[in-house]
């Protein structure tokens, strides 16, 4: 078996608020702040908070092409490489077998499993989709989630919900989420790939898909051998925007009734959809192609510690930089890795996954 190899280029750290950083700037400063990471009692629904010292960091470095894995124990549908192909862009993860849903499932953490997120006919929506509606997904598409197992002998540290990019027009799971998940699981993170609703559905509707996945994980935290507070939500490009929408509009006690009065809440809705970390991979809090720089709006969302990774050749590079720059004012800590001369859409490549896993260990205190 091959051992996972991690190579880091030279790094520099960002100065705090007010710095102007060019792709090759060499600036350094680390900011330590008190970030409140929510701890939740699932049974009571009462949120408690404790203060954990987190350090804001910013680093520009060379990216690392490719990755190697120590384990090859996953089903063949999830065996991926770091090589890009247009065929993989259009590949979709397998659908659930039968009508397995997160509501009726009894999960087996030793296996890779797939579940629909909503009971048939009871997915909250305000968008009217018919058989005449065109799109990437069929008109009767049901959002679903793939739960990957972790290798035997690897201790479970927490859970990560992953959301692929694709401009809300498609989901690039085999370029984004799955190549990352196969790496993260080797560090002990249970990975849940969510195939959320795309356009013509709204970000708010997709955010409810994410919240549903988080509720399922919290409900079954004991089964998965994790602390229910140790959940991160991350996404790539549009998937990151969708992750941000979850934290802004759909976390906590929010359920589908706020969008669709005909939605019938069930027992999963009694569990707050609370996650304690966010990953933005060539993405930002905002709308498609537009980063939010609205400090009061971002403050009101009570965002969690956030990990950013993007390249200097990304067309949205300046927007990424602008948002990261104001996050100290927003009051959250960030860990930012900028890959010098890298473009948009590198997925699980770049050498950042090991850093993300280490950062999660710090956030989760594991």
Image: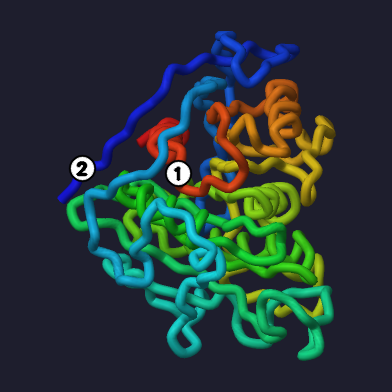
Residue at the location (56% across, 9% down)?
28
Whether residue 361 is visible to the viewer of this picture, yes or no, is no
Residue at the location (22% across, 49% down)?
70
Whether residue 114 is visible to the viewer of this picture, yes or no, is yes
Please tell me the numbered disc located at residue 365. none
Q: Name the residue nearer the viewer: 86 or 113.
A: 86
Residue at the location (32% across, 66% down)?
109
Image quarter for residue 325?
A: top right
Q: Callout 2 environment at 10 Å: few (<14), some (14 to 19), or many (20+)?
A: few
The answer to whether residue 178 is above or below residue 259 is: above
Find numbered disc 1 in the image and state the secondary structure of the residue it sits on.
loop
Q: Callout 1 environment at 10 Å: few (<14), some (14 to 19), or many (20+)?
A: many
Find numbered disc 2 in the image and state the secondary structure of the residue it sits on.
loop
The answer to whether residue 130 is above or below residue 54 is: below
Please tell me the numbered disc located at residue 3. 2
Left or right of 24 in this view: 11: left
Residue 35, horizontal then vertical, whole percent: 58, 27
Labels 2 and 1 touching (C-beta < 8 A): no
Q: Distance between the residues labelled 2 and 1?
A: 16 Å
């Amino acid at each position: 078996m091959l051992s996972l190899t991690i190579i880091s280029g030279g790094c520099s750290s960002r100065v705090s608020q007010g710095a102007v950083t060019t792709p090759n700037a060499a600036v350094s400063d680390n900011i330590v702040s008190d970030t409140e990471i929510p701890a939740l009692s699932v049974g009571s629904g009462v949120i408690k908070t404790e203060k954990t010292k987190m350090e804001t960091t910013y680093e520009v470095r060379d990216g690392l092409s490719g990755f190697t894995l120590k384990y090859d124990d996953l089903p063949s549908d999830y065996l991926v490489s770091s090589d890009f192909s247009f065929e993989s862009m259009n590949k979709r993860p397998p659908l659930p077998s039968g009508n397995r849903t997160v509501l009726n499932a009894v999960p087996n953490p030793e296996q890779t499993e797939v579940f629909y997120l909503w009971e048939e006919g009871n997915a909250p929506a305000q968008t009217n989709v018919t058989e005449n509606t065109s799109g990437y997904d069929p008109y009767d598409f049901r959002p679903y989630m793939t739960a990957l197992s972790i290798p035997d002998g690897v201790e479970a540290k927490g859970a990560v919900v992953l959301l692929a990019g694709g401009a809300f027009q498609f989901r690039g799971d085999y370029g984004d989420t799955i190549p990352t998940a196969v790496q993260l699981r080797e560090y002990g993170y249970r990975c849940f790939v969510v195939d959320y609703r795309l356009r013509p559905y709204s970000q708010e509707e997709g955010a409810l898909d994410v919240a549903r996945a988080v509720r399922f994980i919290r409900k079954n935290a004991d089964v998965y051998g994790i602390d229910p507070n140790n959940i991160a939500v991350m996404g790539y490009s549009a998937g990151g925007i969708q992750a941000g929408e979850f934290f802004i509009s759909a976390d906590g006690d929010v359920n589908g009734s706020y969008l669709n009065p005909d939605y019938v809440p069930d027992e999963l809705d009694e569990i707050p959809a609370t996650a304690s970390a966010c990953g933005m991979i060539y993405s930002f809090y905002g709308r498609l192609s537009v980063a939010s720089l609205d400090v009061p709006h971002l403050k009101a969302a009570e965002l969690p510690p956030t990990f950013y990774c993007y390249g200097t050749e990304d067309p949205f590079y300046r927007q990424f930089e602008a948002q990261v720059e104001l996050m100290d004012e927003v009051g959250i800590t960030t860990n930012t890795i900028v890959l010098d001369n890298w473009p948009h859409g590198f997925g699980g490549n770049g050498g950042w996954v090991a850093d993300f896993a280490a950062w999660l260990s710090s956030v989760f205190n594991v």
